[in-house]
Image (cartoon, rainbow, N blue to C red):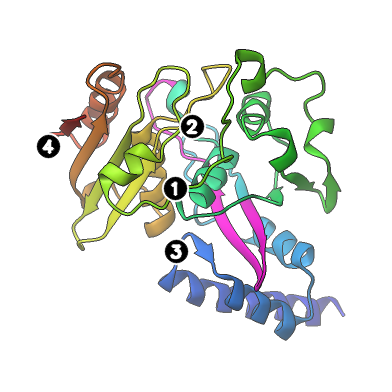
Amino acid sequence: MENHASVQTAELLQQVKKLLKNTPNMIEAVAFESLKLQFKLTDLQLVHILINELNQFSIAPISDFHVIAIALEQTDIGSRIYFGANLEFDKQALSLVVHAEQSAIHNAWLHGAKKIDILAINEAPCGFCRQFINEIPTQLQPKIFLNAQLTNFSDYLPNSFGPADLNIEQPFMSTLKKAETLEEQCFASYAPYTGNQSACEITLDDGHTVFGRYIENAAFNPSLSPLQAALNQVQLYLGCSGYEQITAIRVMQSRAHANQEGITRAITQMICPEINVEFDYY
């Protein structure tokens, strides 16, 4: 039975990797439902295999601690999944790290998810990530799938502090805006605390473009900058850091509330010093 299960898992992963060549950071509902039918798996059984077997996304040169997350959205035509992975920057401040939970949530939101029903992870969420997840309003918060168990998020963060405590009336993911251009991505970002709605566009040498949106947090520190978010999208698209393939970086932000120059220039100087970042303002 174990050999049969191993063969089944190997076949499944082979098919998943083929799917990821077309949509590197997600699996659409039709394809996901087809995999479930073919391998006779439920949503959670399939996700459990993927978070424990797919580690090619994670980049962790400092910790060597590889974390994979999957945000699952249940739709009318089946479940759609969005991948996430941690991203560490060698010889740089640890505050620049992108956590896998941040990655999966941003990835889902960026690609039009109306909600996240389940957030599956292969390691327990740290306090930073729990606070980041808590920016999602209570009625939309995902259940956490860890160690083959499904748990209400509130069990991970009782007596929590969040956007309601700062009188935010439209918390994260409570509204959805379609966005394709950098300007549209900018105004779809989430910046209720500073007012600096902002986004980043990175162009690669194959002509592919990725975006990252700013996500602020009530606790401030767990906020995700647009450049960090965009670099994480490069990571998910290529399966590696891909710094040498970056040809252009653009950031759009508010002239009145601008706060992204420092972190953007610092990270860019480290990973691709030959790139001159272009800043656009509104």
Decide which of tag 3 and tag 2 comes sooner along the chain.
3
Which residue lies under the disc numbered 4?
Answer: 274
Which element is circle 3 on? Answer: loop
Foreground mark, 2 or 4, reads: 4
Residues at marks 3 and 2 touching, judged by CB atoms closer than 8 Å: no
Residue 68 located left or right of residue 220: right
Foreground mark, 2 or 1, reads: 1
Range of residues picked out in magenta:
70-93
Check disc 2: other Cα within 10 Å, few if <14, some if 14-19, many if 20+: few
Residue 24: assigned label: 3
Closer-to-camera residue (236/185): 185
Where is residue 108? Give x, y as percent. 53, 51
Which element is circle 1 on? Answer: loop
Residues at marks 3 and 4 touching, judged by CB atoms closer than 8 Å: no
Which element is circle 2 on? Answer: loop
Which residue lies under the disc numbered 1?
Answer: 177
Foreground mark, 3 or 4, reads: 3
